[in-house]
Amino acid sequence: MRERAAPSTATSPEANSTPRGIVAINGLHYRYPGTEDDALRGVDLEIVPGEVVVLAGASGSGKSTLLRAISGLVPHFHGGEIAGSVRVAGLDTRDHRPGALARHVGSLFQDPETQLVMGTVRAELAFPLQNRGEPPPAVARAVEEVALALAIDGLLERPTAELSGGEQQRVALGATLATRPAVVLLDEPTSQLDPVAGDELIGLLRRLSEDSELAIVLSEHRLERCLSAADRVVALDDGLVACDASPEEFLAWAVREAPSLATPGARLLAGVGLRPTPGVRRARAALRDAGLLSPGAGLRDAGLLPSGAGLRDAGLLPSGAALRDAGLRSRPAASPLHDLEHVSAHIRKKRAPSGERAADAMKLDGLWYEIPRGPAVLKGISVAIEPGERVALMGRNGAGKSTLLRVTARLAKPTRGTVTTAGRVALLLQNPTDYLVHDTVAAEGAPAGTLKAVGLDPCAIATRHPRELSGGEKQRLALAIVLGDLDDSAQAPAVVCLDEPTRGMDRGVKEDLARLLGTLSAAVLVATHDPEFAAAFADRVLLLGDGTIVADGPSADMLAGGIYFATETARILGPRTQ
Amino acid sequence: MTGVVAIRPTAQRWRPSPLRATRASVAVGWCLALSLAALLLSNPLALGALCAVVVTAGTLSGVGPQIRRLGLYAAPLALSIAVVNALVTRDGLTVIARLGDLPVFGTTDITLEATVYGAVLGLRAATLVLCGGLYTLAVDPDAVLALMRRLSFRSALTVSIANRMVPVLMRDSRRLADAQRCRPGGAPGRVALLRATTSGVLDRALDVAASLEVRGYGAAWAGRGGSPTTPWSRHDLEFALSGVLVTATAVAARVLGVAAFSAYPTLNAPVGPGAIAVSLLLASCALAPFADRRGI
């Protein structure tokens, strides 16, 4: 099958255009240089104008490679061996480099930082238009329009290096959309965004698709965020198209064939014997139609669950696993409601003023952090966490989550206030690769016992290069490094902090991490944008807003009462009443 | 998200300056003229004057602290060049130290001439580093990228990566340092850190190159429209004239042997009227455009 990319004979875009498809992929096989396995194995796909297609699949399933094949980076930029064909707007990607395809296709990769190539936001938005040779008035008009559409008009004169991660993502998207391409490819565009910004972005993409027949191909791990906006889902498994169907059909398939791809809402509906459907509104409608939810109220309000009994206790669930898988908790639980109440009770007991309260593992008292000649990032934070407590730190981009962790770990010195900890603070920053600086895993110096504790086999990986490990393995290794020797009481941390540990991770890896955090005896503080992950590991949630703690409570309450910082299951079940 | 703390220190705020107000092609040419003068001239006085010119130009462009910090990084480079030259060069008649038999170097006599010549080489290297720093810090990289777009994809890519990689790598190195501070026990050795940083540089450069490709940079139809022809501003004219005069002065001094310098076999570095005149002329030609701050 193998052959190097060879020029095809067809050259006329008009002659090669398929009747409907703006993207036509036929029998695509691709292998990266220096590897033995195909990243894509016979992919056939056609995408029509205005279609929103979500690419689903575990890490390494070929989603990013497929996007890069459509943009032309595969094979022109990455090299390797390719067979089959990819046509974008009638252009064969083997004959046209990415620069030429950019007239029709816009790409947004995972890391916006390296995609901003100009000094200011205005220059960044104008850059692709100038590359196309557009006249200055057209460039100026397009920049203003795309800035208004993405609500980044206030950033136009800002240096790109000063933007936050979320702002960078929007600007990079703006540069992608500025040329009004026929197809936009997005590789996990919400991975750096808070739930509010993520939902806004998905909504915006849907609107753009409807307004201008823009075809959108979107790779995502957090499917619950985007399925309701999708027309179609293509699930990849080891380079093969495992499912190509509507969102409803995909969810039914996922529940049956690939549970790790099923959304929490789908698992919930399947658990009560209903056909899975994407989106909160439709899921609630399905529950109402089945008589399981009264209009405008939650399950319990509907009288179906008059007490704290769980769904299984009510005979509605055949198994607790479905709801446990739904992301409410990774630990064994009977049902979401049962589980949430169990956690609430647990927290209440732990925090009862009965004199049994354990000494704090960490205590922040009146903590301020002000940037020299800049704004205050933290404004009088006071909070205490007990040993063994698992706390999720949530909030919008720029709320101060990362700074709070850095100050706690003494990487940054507070302007005012005190940080008191019962021992060492282990901090795992966002990019685990930053911790891996040696040639072999063994040389990184993580104790064997800790490696085992985080689920790695020290003997099996000792001689491997750390950067060759999978994303989940890298993170475990980095975690083992910062944890140190857990058997040595002098070195074992009193507090473990993790900053956005689930970014770009599939559901399976996230569940493993949640389980792992549950085994640690130290206090755990995790900054995360992922409500499902927070529900899976946390006893308590701190919600940060503009440098202050705006809410602090048991995860059962915090993750069930909101619109954005709430799990999909909780949003489907509706607001809880006491 | 990385947070405001991690991002703000590396942000580059442009301050209005005559050099900044100059079109990219002229500003680049002016920086190249200073570099060319540093390569052509060997007289320590003239090189010292050029070095001072670059630092002053940086200060007048609002990037004085960064240029001075860069000078601190360049100083060890200059010193190491001077030391190595003194150790390995056998020329020169004035022996100032006899070190005897040294491993690798053999019988080593340190001469005054080799030491001074090494110092001049180091000064030249430091001046070139500072010229590069001034270009990076004071010339608009976006305008340079637009300028290079008309030339070739590869050249533009190189320039863009060079411009973009500085802030990105500063951020990366800060992140790497923070990660190492989070390790219990001792931090890894410098070689390991350098290797990790280097591999990170390659990854980053690939990412930037891919981004440029998918944004249509270097495509066949690029530059068809482009910017309208803008009339030359007073700053364009002044810096262009300054660059021409600096180059002419350096070339003339080199050809005519004014401000000449030879180290071997004995030092001949006249700090006479010729060298002083060349130094003053270079400084005044290079810095004169900064006096005009209208329209910046």
Image (cartoon, coloured by chain):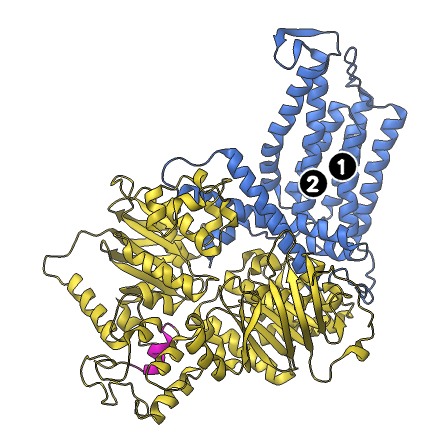
Chain colours: A yellow, B blue
Task: Name the residue located 40 percent from the left edge and 62 percent from the top edge.
Answer: A510
Location of the N terminus of chain A by quadrant is bottom right
Q: Position of residue A32 (x, y in %)?
A: 64, 57
Amino acid at the residue labelled 1 = Ser
Whether the magenta-drawn stretch holds residue B187 is answered as no
- Which span of residues is magenta-colored? A565-575
Task: Name the residue located 45 percent from the left edge and 51 percent from the top edge.
Answer: A474
Q: Which residue is mark 1?
A: B35
Whether the magenta-drawn stretch holds residue A571 is answered as yes
Q: Which residue is mark 2?
A: B132
- The number of numbered discs placed on residues in the rendered structure image is 2
Depth check, front residue: B69 or A317:
A317
Q: Classify residue A100 by image quadrant.
A: bottom right
Are the two marked residues, 2 and 1, in contact with CB atoms closer than 8 angstroms?
yes
Which of the marked residues, 2 or 1, is nearer the chain's N terminus?
A: 1
Left or right of A430? Residue A344 is: left
Instruction: Please tell me how crowded label 1 is: few (under 14), some (14-19), or many (20+) other residues with Cα within 10 Å.
Output: many
Task: Name the residue located 65 percent from the left edge and 46 percent from the top edge.
Answer: B137
Marks 2 and 1, Cα distance to the nearest angstrom? Answer: 8 Å
Depth check, front residue: A568 or A205:
A568
| Direction left: furthest residue | A354
Q: Position of residue A335 (x, y in %)?
A: 26, 76
Amino acid at the residue labelled 2 = Gly
Left or right of A58? Residue B233 is: right
Chain to which the residue tagged by mark 1 belongs: B
